[in-house]
Image: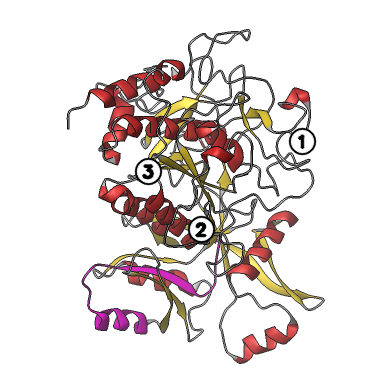
Amino acid sequence: MFIYTAGRKKVKLDLVKSEVGFYEGESFLRVALGEREYTSRLSEQVTRSAQQHLEMPGRLRAVRAVRAARLGAPPAVFEEEHSRLTRVVYKEVVIRFAPKIPQKRRRQILAKHGLKIRRENAFVRDQVVAYDATGKHTGVGMIDVANDCAEMVEVVFATPNFISQYRRDAIPLIPVAQWHLHNRGKVSGQVKDEDVNAREAWKITQGKRNITIAVLDDGVDVEHPNLKSNIKKNPDPKEPLDTCGRDFFVPDDHPEHFNPRPKRFQWPYYQMTGNDIHGTPCAGVVSAVGKDALGIAPKCRILPVKIFHADDLAPDARVADAIRYAARHADILSCSWSGPASPDIEVAIQDAGTIGREEKGSAVFCASGNGAEMMGEGVSYPAAFDEAIAVGASTDTGKRAGYSQYGAELWIVAPSNGGKQEIYTTDVGYDNRGFNIGAEQYGGADGLHTNGFGGTSSATPLAAGIGALILSVKPSLDRDQVAQILAATADKIGSGYNSAGWSKRYGYGRVNAVAAVEAASAMKL
């Protein structure tokens, strides 16, 4: 089976054996891959996410009501062939109609498959979420419905409204200090000046308060002493409840929607599995301020946009709308995660080019992924989409990090772990939570910082922050010009560059903050 991307490429899906079962009155969705049962943890995640987002029946009383309403086949579970990420669909499809398609024709397209509109998109008026009101196409059948709609000339894209598994692309370990900003070569084997030249760039600008970087992740500790002064206040002036960002994992009418902080924790609290501890270090790499830790753009602001609750499956449509929201209220978007190919997310990144910055576009930086040693050549989604800036990782020895995914879509690399030293940045400040739960050797006894962050998760906000420095000196640039400056000024580390200065392992090279800022300052527009 397959679905279409917005560019009409086919993405292969493998149907996973699954069944809806009931235990002590509660429903659960048991999944297996061939003869191999999924881990009990993933089964839990699928069940919890399905009940939260897909109207899974809860107690037996509800099950009888569901059967009486003839709501059709149960949710269908798939693995995306390339990424091996899990996706679940029940009875909804997301459809973006082409502009100026008459309402009568839109109703005919929906009626063909017995679809009714669940809700209209809050950011794009031509896009709707529709559901199978007849129960004839639920589960696997929604794949055929979406593909049939996607092949129509009146439709920009159509996709099952999946909830999907996403990877937060960090590789946490141990050691010290912010060598990625200024590498003095103090650690044995480290190569001096293998950094982004932040100190030199800061002589020109440390960023401007009117430039905002959105961090789309599992939440940001907005009260952290190195972050709180840089959190953007009241990002949406038309919504008084929007005080410091939003949580798109939950519905808009949920009481937690306007709270973008970390929320989900379980023991062991220092591991990413089950814990919202990834977004706060990313935010610190971008724009931490204070004597204990600095981000690359310490005078820019941060917009926290929560899209994950730990590693529970997330609705693709909500992730896409989080991108649209962020593009309305931020100049740069930083996405340190990867997931399956979603045409809704693909088009949301395109939308950011018109929604953002009075149509100059908000640049969307995405992690290339950490699976190179397992998957070989190929960049993860959404970094692989044409409109994204795909960021890989280099090390303090001037080489590509072995885990960093590479390939035709890679644009640039930025320093991260994988060499002699990891990344020092902010950590979740809640007691006994975070990568460092309070040990001097892991970043400090107060637990406010970690010295073991890394992966393309750390490289991405570093590159995004340099994009913010570029806009700080030349705010009239559009997002394509920002990307071109980063490419033109990158350091050619490693080898394998073609005549255009591009390499499949390094993209256009390692970002150079001072060269990028100088080039932007010199541009005549």
Q: Residue at x 64, y 39 (%)?
A: 224
The secondary structure type at the circle numbered 3 is loop
Circle 3 Cα neighbour tier, 10 Å, few/some/many (<14 / 14–19 / ≥20): many
Where are the magenta residues, as a range?
87-112
Residue nearest the observer in this picture, 63 or 308: 308
Picture coordinates of residue 186, whole percent (x, y): 60, 8
Residue nearest the observer in this picture, 367 or 208: 208
Circle 1 Cα neighbour tier, 10 Å, few/some/many (<14 / 14–19 / ≥20): many
Q: Residue at x 58, y 25 (%)?
A: 417
Q: Which residue is drawn at 63% across and 54% down?
A: 309
Q: In this view, does 199 lie above or below 236?
A: above
Dividing the picture into quadrants, the one containing residue 497 is top left
Name the mark nearer the viewer: 3 or 2. 2
Residue 8 visible in the picture: yes
Left or right: where does residue 6 sit relative to residue 424? Answer: left
Q: Which mark is first along the chain, 1 or 2?
A: 2
Picture coordinates of residue 179, whole percent (x, y): 56, 18
Name the mark nearer the viewer: 1 or 3. 3
The amino acid sitting under disc 2 is Asp
Picture coordinates of residue 328, whole percent (x, y): 38, 53
Q: Which mark is first along the chain, 3 or 1?
A: 3
Q: Mark 1 points at which residue?
A: 437
Considering every residue shown, the one lying at the far bottom of the view is 68
Q: In this view, does 183 lie above or below 350?
A: above
Q: Mark 2 points at which residue?
A: 242
